[in-house]
Image (cartoon, grey):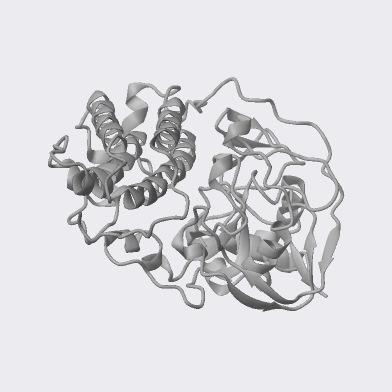
Amino acid sequence: MNDILRAPAAPQLPAPDVIARDYARVRGASETLCRPLITEDFGLQTAEFASPPKWHLAHVSWFFETFLLEPFLPGYTVFHPAFKSLFNSYYEQVGHYHPRPERGFLSRPSVDEVYAYRAHVDEGMRALFARSGEDCWPAVVQRTRIGLNHEQQHQELLLTDIKQHFSVNPLRPAYRTDLAPVSTGQAIPLKWFPHEGGLVRAGHEGNSFAYDNEGPRHQVFLNAFALANRPVTNGEYLEFMEAGGYKEPALWLSDGWSAVHRLGWTSPRYWERHEGRWMEFTLGGLRPLDLAAPVSHVSHFEADAFATWAEARLPTEFEWEVAASALMLEGNFVDSDRLQPQATSGEGLVQMFGDVWEHTASAYLAYPGYSQAAGALGEYNGKFMSGQMVLRGGSCVTPADHIRATYRNFFYPHERWQFQGFRLARDL
């Protein structure tokens, strides 16, 4: 056993058949998501920030091979020695990795060989699970949980990257032609829900799975605030645009105003104007804009500018978490098979989970008492705590069992290819 991560034993470890069933389910979901693709789609990389589907499928297998099979399965033979660098994403302590902007250069290995790699790794993992009586079992369980959640993250990236790749094709291809049609309903009225503030506790605690960046649980003082009952809609964002929102520098952070000009923003990503009508490119192809659905594919800069225009602000991640912690963890996730933010109804705070990742006003930083894990797995979250902003709640392409109220996603403030939206907050 190496020293990448020595996981402490949990009070109740799952039985081997339980962890094996979870492993098979998550691994199968990745391949199900790729079934609508044709061979030519698997190698596409149309932007430096987006990876080819083939690379995603191989990288998640590399994770299990590198962090589980090599250290824990005696006699394991790697599928291909070059894959150690080809499908390493950014783990400096593991060794060299192929440059991210050049993942689309890899016409080889073939798609068939990548699927053979996955099968090879799956066979090894089944053999590893059969060795559950050994002393390494607590560490195997811990790393497998990390690996499955890591693969679920890449399932979301598969869909958002496919959307990016297809969006630049003049044929306007749809990833799926059988997705639900655009709704024609009205957005529920915007309401404000107050919170008295005070000293609260935030962050994850307990034995259930969470990433290291979600803890430790700690105290935070909040001033009294109010949170909007739902995210900002496409229709409301269109009002901001028509009022000259992209032309008024007073609304924007300095870096945001620079991004507007440098990147040529005039609307959310994937919005298009056709014969006087707004359309949106979706995983179901080009469709009429649903004015009642949450706006998505907007950057932190755009969300902040809208909030300033609306005489409000973005919530902090702790305001968001305190509000979300009292709610049922349900929403429009990838399991709903809509693959697009939806208009909703209901009372109280709605759509806190699913539909769109919600921008917050909080920088992605370590919590008090955070300690980065030793070894390469310590690079998973900790080394990115600089220059990025926190988003909460999951999206319409997030697996439902992957999210929780303490989950911290993070992106640079100019990025917007993910299903990112926002809700407003106000001081009281």
Seen from the viewer's position, the closer of residues 196 and 133 is 133
Q: Is residue 423 visible?
A: no
Q: Does 344 sit above or below residue 305?
A: above
Residue at position x 41%, y 33% from top?
Answer: 17
Q: Nearer the viewer, residue 363 or 52?
A: 363
Question: Does any portion of residue 183 appear in the rendered image?
Answer: yes
Of the 4 image quadrants, the one containing the N terminus is bottom left
Residue 393 in the image: x percent, y percent? 62, 52
Say how many tags the image has.
0
Q: Position of residue 19 (x, y in %)?
A: 42, 38
Q: Where on the picture, by quarter, is residue 339?
A: top right
**Residue 15 placed where, x, y %?**
42, 39
Quadrant of the snapshot with the C terminus: bottom right
Task: Answer with left or right where residue 112 lies relative to residue 397.
Answer: left
**The quarter of the displayed image where residue 385 is located:** bottom left
From the top left corner, tell me how far across and down residue 252 is, in percent.
Answer: 63, 69
